[in-house]
Image: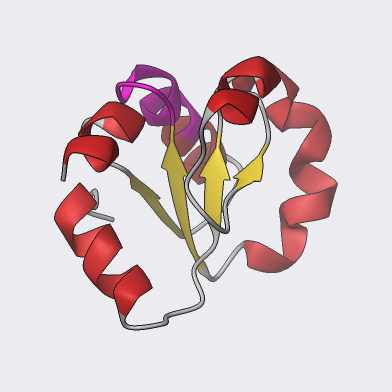
Amino acid sequence: MPDITPAELKQRQAAGEKLTIIDVRETWENEEARIEGSQNIPLGTLPQKLDDLDELKNQEIIVHCKGGGRSSSAKAFLSQQGFMNVRNLVGGFQAYQQA
């Protein structure tokens, strides 16, 4: 799946779409600021949370971190686990805040 730009994500949020957004930053980063409606699953805990995400295997999942590196790893990991529609937020949370 192609990645998603901050502008596209904000446009879809403004349209009221129900989106699955996973923030793979550390909990303390998420507590400082977050994308509304996102759930925090730090990258290091993602393997243990797979069972909780199983029903999302065929749905769109948007992953993000601060700048895009950790979420790129999360996208690759989830794709390897059979998740079919994982998109990385280009530029991460930093780019989202500036969009």
Q: In the figure, 92 relative to 11: above or below?
A: above
Determine the residue located farthest toward the front in the rendered image: 32
Q: Is residue 71 magenta?
A: yes
Please state the horizontal and vertical placement of residue 3, each as a whole percent of the image: 24, 48
**Snapshot quadrant of residue 45:** top right
Residue at 52% from the left image edge and 54% from the top image edge = 36
Q: Is 46 on the left-hand or right-hand side of 82?
A: right
Q: Check the picture and name the quadrant holding the N terminus.
A: bottom left
Q: Is 79 on the left-hand or right-hand side of 98?
A: right
Decide if residue 75 is in sight here: yes
Please state the horizontal and vertical placement of residue 34, each as a whole percent of the image: 51, 39
Q: Is residue 11 magenta?
A: no
Residue at 50% from the left image edge and 31% from the top image edge = 74
Q: In the figure, 98 relative to 72: above or below?
A: below
Decide if residue 5 is in sight here: no
Residue at 47% from the left image edge and 47% from the top image edge = 35
The one nearer the camera, 87 or 28, is 28
- Asked which colour scheme the image uses, the reply is secondary structure
In the image, the segment drawn in magenta is: 65-74
Q: Is 16 on the left-hand or right-hand side of 45?
A: left
